[in-house]
């Protein structure tokens, strides 16, 4: 699902809780930190995506959350998914070589 505003994101989460969220740090005229706080409280895994680069400063409560730097490719996304799901041998949708 895609949301253009914080209010829209909360409404979409309320109607259908996601298994994972990728939050753009900037959403509309606001930031996505209230959404991240909600996801954290509810145990929903998430990561941030941003084009802010090195100047991005997240609150301490989100320091452990993976951050994808835009533009990001498949390898960066897979690495972030593995960081979000560290105990899983397979990230949903990822092919795993049976010899692994």
Image (tube, rainbow, N blue to C red):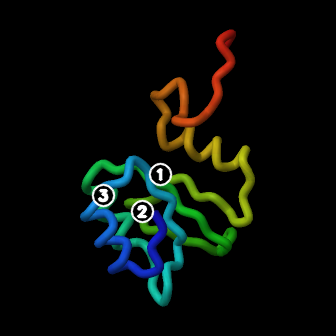
**Disc 2: which residue:** 60
Furthest-top residue in this view: 99
Residue shown at the point (38%, 60%) measured from the top left: 61
Q: Nearer the viewer, residue 59 or 41?
A: 41
Q: Position of residue 42 (x, y in %)?
A: 26, 53
Looking at the rendered image, the disc whose residue lies closer to the viewer, 1 or 2, is 1
Q: Nearer the viewer, residue 3 or 85?
A: 3
**Disc 3: which residue:** 16
Q: Secondary structure at mark 3?
A: loop
Residue shown at the point (31%, 71%) measured from the top left: 10
Residue shown at the point (52%, 35%) measured from the top left: 92
Q: Nearer the viewer, residue 3 or 33?
A: 3
**Structural crowding at the residue carrying mark 2, measured as other residues with C-alpha within 10 Å and reported as few (<14), some (14–19) or many (≥20):** few
Looking at the rendered image, the disc whose residue lies closer to the viewer, 3 or 2, is 3
**Disc 1: which residue:** 64
Q: CA distance from mark 1 to mark 2?
A: 8 Å
Q: Sequence order check: which comes first, mark 1 or mark 3? A: 3
The relative height of residue 43 versus residue 30 in the rendered view (above or below) is above
**Structural crowding at the residue carrying mark 1, measured as other residues with C-alpha within 10 Å and reported as few (<14), some (14–19) or many (≥20):** few
The relative height of residue 35 versus residue 99 in the rendered view (above or below) is below
| Horizontal side, residue 63 vs residue 100: left or right | left
């Amino acid at each position: 699902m895609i949301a253009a505003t914080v209010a829209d994101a909360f409404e979409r989460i309320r109607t259908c809780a996601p298994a994972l969220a990728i939050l753009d740090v900037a959403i509309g005229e606001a930031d996505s930190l209230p959404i991240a706080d909600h996801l954290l409280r509810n145990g929903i895994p998430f990561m941030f995506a941003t084009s802010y680069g090195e100047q991005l400063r997240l609150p301490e409560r989100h320091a452990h959350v993976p951050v994808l730097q835009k533009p990001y490719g498949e390898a960066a996304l897979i690495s972030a998914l593995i960081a979000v799901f560290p105990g899983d041998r397979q990230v949903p949708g990822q092919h795993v070589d049976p010899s692994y």
